[in-house]
Amino acid sequence: MQQVVFDEPYDFIPPYYTNWGPHLLRFYVRRYVRKAYGVHSVESRHVERLRDSVAAGRSVMLAPNHCRLADPMVLGIMALDVPVYLHAMASWHLFKEGWFQTFIIRALGAYSVLREGNDRKSLETSIDILVARKRPLIVFPEGALTKHNDLINEMMEGPTFLARQAARRLKKMGEPSEVVIHPVVVRYAFDGDVQQAIGPTLDGLEARLSWQPKHNLTMFERIAKLGDALLALKEIEYLGAARSGNLYDRAEQFVETVLNRVEDAWDQKDRSGGVIARVKRLRTLILADMVAGKVTPEERERRWYDLAALYYAQQISHYPRDYITAGKNLPEHVIETVERLEEDFIDHAHLYQPLRAVVEVGEAIPVGPERVRDEEGGDPIMAEIRTQLQAMMDGLAAERTAV
């Protein structure tokens, strides 16, 4: 299990507001994303939409999909074509993975947010950035890293909440500035030889299961067999026995069963939203007394068991149904699936390259100070963000398929 939550007091990590960091790092960031993430090129599209919003003095938020750790830095490269520097809200755990990564992401304008609680300081910082109108702000509406290019996960309403709060403050100040959200899609294409790239990885994962290499099977059959094995291991660990049936049906049943059990154990009545929202609520509940040091060692161990179960429930929910098949062979879909298997088996993935990123900026969506709901009680602005994101994704995927 990768460490994405911590049972220790949270310290807000503010952004650097000076321009020296991004100004200097603009000469290094392309090299860094190539070395650290295998992204060899970044193509920007429709940056004039963002350029127009900035030139008009608007408060600008970017609402991108989030499929790779490289996303914030790739967006920063796109912003150099405007040109403008960015701020970004980033999960606290990213600042705890080494001093160099912390330095880089802070220098590029990132600041922390505690996703397992009400982080007032981070929210206030976000609103301050929007009101100041010096840099656009990145907020990822999916709320978690998904590891799949062409699908949008459930979306949180945090972006529109922050945008409305900024609009209210500007109105109070008598400022005529408009607050807008630009949906942005980042899509990666893998331009290498897929079979050559993942072959050693599949051999290694099979060896960890004490299997002989399954070279007699197709690439898709090997991946499916490993996915079946991973799910069976987690079924045995958390449900008591491996189950049979369709792999995706079993995955959905696993996720729902684990969530329901933990929600029952913690008397969590609110079960609304998707997997990410439910996991976030439970993590907040479970971690509170751990952070405060109010639990015994035995109780702490029990809580970590539940947190691990939630981690794997969320991870397994990120394997989209029929994302790879023999008849739908987008190389990046295969790479993403193998990366997820590696992370869930051994907590880290190999670097697969070369990746080519395309960043497309959507049309500006104005956000007013008042909360608006559609007939079904949903947020129409979030619906529009989702619509634009999926349309841009579909267009980029169609281009890729046509190659």
Image: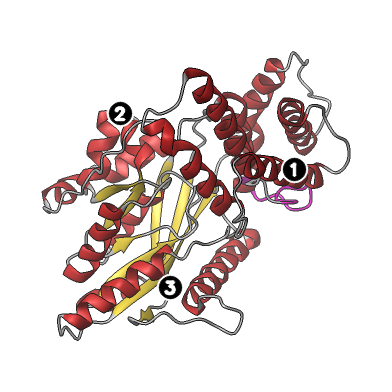
* Secondary structure state at the residue bearing disc 3: loop
Looking at the image, is 385 positioned above or below residue 204? below
> Do tag 2 and tag 1 residues touch (Cβ < 8 Å)?
no
Q: Amino acid at mark 1?
A: Ala
Q: Which residue is mark 1?
A: 251
Q: Which residue is mark 2?
A: 98
Residue 137, percent from left and from top? 29, 62
* Secondary structure state at the residue bearing disc 1: helix
Confirm whether residue 150 shows in the render.
yes
Residue 108, percent from left and from top? 23, 48
Q: Which residue is mark 3?
A: 362
Q: Give the residue displayed 60% in from the left and 31% down from the top.
A: 344
> Quick one: label 3, few (<14), some, or many (20+) residues within 10 Å?
many
Q: Nearer the viewer, residue 120 or 137?
A: 120
> Do tag 2 and tag 3 residues touch (Cβ < 8 Å)?
no
Q: Mark 2 to mark 3: distance in Å?
A: 34 Å
